[in-house]
Amino acid sequence: MQTLVGTPASSGVVRARWAIVREEAAPVGGTITPEAVEAELARVAAARSAAAAQLEAIAARIAAAGHPDEAAIFSAQAEMARDPMLVELTGQRIRERLEDGIAATLAAAEEIAAQLRALPDELLAARAADLTDVGLRIARQLAGRGDEPGPRLEAPVIVVARDIPPSVAATLPRERVLGFALETGSPTAHAAILARAYGIPAVVGVSGLIAALERAAAAAGRPVELAIDGDSGEVVIDPDQPTARRFDQLAAAAARATDRAIAEASLPAVTLDGAEVTLLANIGTPDEAARCVALGARGVGLFRTEFLFLERLTPPSEDEQLAAYRSVVEAFAPHPVTIRLLDVGGDKPIPYLPLEPEANPFLGVRALRLAATRPDLFVTQLRAAYRAATGGPVKVMAPMVADATDVELLLSLAEQARAGLEGEGVERGEVEIGVMLEIPSAILVADTYFGRIAFGSLGTNDLLQYTVAVDRGNRALSRYQDSLHPALLRLVRDAVAAAERAGIELSVCGEMAGDPVAALALVGLGVRKLSMAAGSLPLVRRTVRATRLADLRAAAEASLGEPAASAVRARFQALAAG
Ligand code: PEP
Ligand code: MG
């Protein structure tokens, strides 16, 4: 038995046989004569079209199987195959260096991939692998190997590989993949996204795994098993009896917890004295919708849309956004889906958004503030939202709203989108417009604009960082990062009061809502809508159902005068424990 440790990338535990999926050798390129240049350019153009068509067909197949998120990876690759920069660089190499199509395509793809890898953004760096993969697909076409690449799996196994490019991932027979264990990759790599979408465990970054497995199999002279834990990152080769039992127990406990959560999903989150709380889901991709519905979310309180914008070289089209929004809206109808407008800024380089580097990106041109220079991005997003609203109730909220002037900007963008669709005779539904309350000033002056909007949603992650002036990711300052800080509680109280005065809806969509103890404080302060990651729904529901509103109110009132979050936490912890 040998234990290795990697990075957990998709939750779950499995013990099974394994198969190594190896990378295929790339076709070998060469040179051409000057007379052959034109013909070679035409051959490359045809290969590129064939590769793009193949990728679009894969995307359509996967979308039809109900996995729009994964399908988007292949649509993006189809676009990469036609990317003007790739076309230009390939053409240049053929004309100027007399490289043949294979050599020129592989080199051009690698050149662009190297530029992507150099960007300090993990997601874009991960897209470098997609581009190399596209280059390889075009080269395969040129070499007459245009059929689908990919391994066959004879039995259900844990797939072991150095890395899994999307082209291979697309051809893996789903029902025979029990998990992934990869030597390279990050939790944002495609195999990891895929694993999460399909609910199978994955561990990435397990260095030395393939050699260790081969050594173990050779030494044992029999097939050896592999056990992986997608929550801890533990990978065990040839587990002994006690280890095998431990993994089986973990897998059984996970299955029981899921069964119980699903069995309780239809129960309302109501306190013992009858106060009802609506539990909503936070999602970052359409693929998460089904699990949220199964766990009893009564709508989406926060649909982060950055996934559409970050992993690519060009902005997503209105139709592409519409497809993503509509799939979520249809999954949740008749419950509402709250789409959050793009929240990016100078901390994340985006190739198609020339953002100046800033000394303090979180205090800079972030989120709605981008609308001053790129209103088109937001209008397109709003148009897609209005169109998606034909399938079910849709709300749209803007992040990083500071005051009434920001709200006027948001409303005018929404009006442009609505009027544009109206003028073009495009079918649309109604959309409620609201704001995220995540900057203290937005709460301090709420009375100046609450009458103009339909709802507010407290983004407590940013609200806390801007209230106590502490970077939300800085581990050295953890004492400030408890959302039960009395300063934050006072802002929540003020937001609840302002929403009641204006008669508009108020929810919380920061992580605080998914922390069962903090959720009780929010309910005590008067919040009746809590939006959280799917995994938090079962425990928050159970905790709310075990408490009395009268006790929560009294504890909340007393907490406002506490000197520190720790005292507040102790108070609500006692109520949660019951
Ligand atoms: C928040 O700030 O609380 C929030 C929900 O948004 P994000 O975490 O995406 O910034
Ligand atoms: Mg935020």
Image (cartoon, helix red, strand yellow):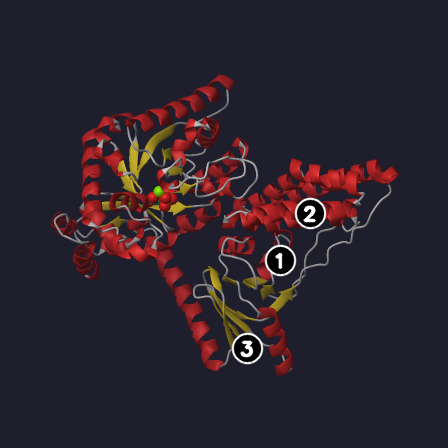
In the rendered structure, which disc, 3 or 1, sits on the residue that comes first in sequence? 1
Please name whichever residue, 262 or 232, is drawn nearer the observer in this view of the structure: 232
Question: Is residue 513 visible to the viewer in this orientation of the structure?
Answer: yes
Instruction: Name the residue at 50% across, 19% down.
Output: 425
Q: Which residue corresponds to mark 1?
A: 173
Question: Is label 2 in a helix, a strand or a loop?
Answer: helix
- Judged from the image, the quadrant occupied by ligand 1 is top left
Vertical side of 316 occupied by 114: above or below: below
Question: Is label 3 in a helix, a strand or a loop?
Answer: loop
Q: Name the mark nearer the viewer: 2 or 1.
A: 2
In the rendered structure, which disc, 2 or 3, sits on the residue that comes first in sequence? 2
Question: Is label 1 in a helix, a strand or a loop?
Answer: loop
Residue 334: percent from the left, percent from the top?
Answer: 38, 38
Q: Which residue corresponds to mark 3?
A: 238
Mark identifier at residue 135: 2
Question: Is residue 503 visible to the viewer in this orientation of the structure?
Answer: no
| Residue found at the far front of this picture | 359
Classify residue 358 by image quadrant. top left
Mark 2 surroundings: few (<14), some (14-19) or many (≥20) residues within 10 A: many
Residue 380: percent from the left, percent from the top?
Answer: 48, 29
Query: Which amino acid lies under the numbered mark 1 shown in the image of this protein?
Result: Pro
Q: CA distance from mark 3 to mark 1?
A: 25 Å
